[in-house]
Image (cartoon, rainbow, N blue to C red):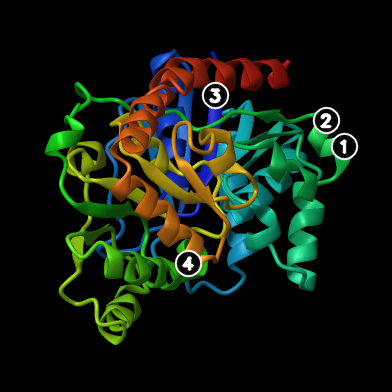
């Protein structure tokens, strides 16, 4: 049994947080003592308190306006780690990785950084970012979703790291809707954040597509800071009758099972949970070939989905048109997509995490 401490920016609806909670709770079920330091609590519609069986959650900052907050956080994480006799500290995303590495060095215990996206896009080139990267490169080990994300970091860290993809979470019997009963819809699920998700490109692509396929509508599940801006773009493009904002969903696989196809237009992602879930219920999926390679890991073009270049509204519209006008291709890709359920089973994924953590502690 190990005493394991995770560090998270905040526990919210994000993919990184969902993965952290899965790993933490699964390790607790395996008999480890597990703690999560939640760096800040934010009270808005996109954040919520998770109930985690067997996991102790410690929220560090009730607000995020403290002066010298980095020193404050390091001191408190160190105090928690000493008090609970922590064996290994694991960060999720950039600043948690930074804190995990520093506290690990101070207490002479292993630290693991976990990269959940594309650091080439999320970490800049300012002096602060350079310090951040300098420190993270000195972690004892690392977990990456995709091999392509490793190249940002020093070879020393790469050699000590492991690649573990996201699992697909199946809580109930998966819906299996016949293609003949599916609706004339395009659906997308994700945080309403245009910098990464590129809703401007999505709306441009859908506008081109719907001119030739006017029976379709676009459904957007999610919320985020750019929701008002995206709604303005919908009106500007004359799509008010064709785009529906569905709000948050806590059961995405059930909610999207009857839709016609799934669309993701991100410039960068780790392994998209929403894309995995759409594939698991057999939706024909159209995705940008986003960096650092998550979509290409999941999708074989024209075999279990369709890929298009990032930022290319015309190619995305063409891909949607292929599915809308070729039922056999849509059926084949949707049926083949379901194989992700076995390929990314949670049991395989958590065993890899546990073996790596325990091995690093030795």
Tell me if residue 174 comes above or below residue 120 in the rendering: above
Look at mark 4 in the image and give the residue it sits on.
Answer: 313
Q: CA distance from mark 2 to mark 1?
A: 5 Å
3D distance between C-alphas at marks 3 and 1: 26 Å
Q: Is residue 40 rendered to the left or right of residue 206?
A: right
Cα–Cα span, label 2 and label 4: 38 Å
Res. 3 mark: 3
Q: What is the quadrant of residue 144 in the picture?
A: top right
The residue mark sitting in front, 3 or 2, is 2
Q: Quadrant of the N terminus?
A: top right
* Mark 4 and mark 3: Cα distance apart in space: 48 Å
Question: Residue 323's spot in the image, x, y percent?
Answer: 34, 46
Q: Is residue 159 toward the left or the right of residue 173 in the image?
A: right
Q: Mark 3 or mark 2: name the one nearer the start of the chain.
A: 3
Residue to which mark 1 is pinned: 156
Secondary structure beneath label 3: strand
Residue 80 relative to residue 324: left or right: right
Q: How many residues crowd mark 3 within 10 Å: few (<14), some (14–19), many (20+)?
A: some
Q: Which of 329 and 306 lies nearest the eye of the viewer?
A: 329
Residue 33, numbered label: none
Residue drawn at x 36%, y 72% is 225
């Amino acid at each position: 049994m190990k005493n394991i401490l995770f560090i998270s920016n905040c526990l919210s609806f994000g993919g990184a947080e969902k993965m952290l909670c899965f790993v933490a709770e699964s390790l607790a079920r395996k008999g480890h003592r597990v703690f999560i330091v939640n760096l800040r609590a934010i009270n808005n519609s996109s954040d919520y308190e998770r109930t985690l069986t067997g996991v102790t959650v410690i929220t560090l900052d009730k607000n995020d306006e403290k002066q010298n907050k980095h020193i404050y956080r390091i001191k408190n994480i160190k105090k928690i780690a000493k008090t609970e006799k922590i064996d290994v500290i694991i960060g999720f995303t950039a600043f948690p990785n930074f804190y995990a590495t520093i506290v690990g060095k101070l207490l002479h215990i292993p630290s693991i950084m976990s990269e959940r996206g594309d650091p080439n896009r999320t970490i800049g080139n300012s002096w602060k970012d350079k310090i951040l990267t300098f420190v993270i490169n000195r972690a004892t080990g690392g977990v990456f979703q995709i091999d392509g994300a490793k190249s940002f970091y020093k070879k020393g860290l790469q050699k000590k790291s492991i690649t573990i993809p996201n699992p697909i979470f199946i809580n109930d019997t998966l819906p299996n809707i016949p293609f003949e009963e599916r609706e004339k819809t395009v659906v997308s699920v994700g945080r309403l954040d245009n910098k990464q998700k590129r809703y401007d490109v999505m709306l441009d692509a859908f506008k081109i597509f719907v001119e030739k396929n006017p029976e379709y509508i676009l459904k957007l599940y999610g919320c985020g800071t750019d929701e008002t801006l995206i709604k303005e773009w919908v009106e500007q493009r004359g799509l008010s009758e064709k785009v529906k904002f569905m709000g948050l969903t806590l059961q995405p696989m059930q909610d999207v099972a009857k839709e016609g196809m799934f669309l993701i237009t991100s410039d960068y992602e780790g392994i998209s949970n929403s894309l995995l879930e759409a594939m698991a219920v057999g939706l024909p999926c159209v995705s940008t070939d986003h960096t650092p390679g998550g979509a290409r890991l999941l999708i074989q073009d024209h075999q279990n989905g369709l890929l298009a270049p990032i930022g290319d509204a015309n190619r995305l519209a063409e891909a949607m048109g292929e599915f809308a006008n070729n039922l056999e291709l849509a059926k084949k890709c949707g049926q083949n997509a379901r194989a992700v359920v076995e390929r990314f089973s949670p049991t395989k994924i958590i065993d890899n995490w546990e073996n790596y953590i325990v091995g690093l502690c030795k």
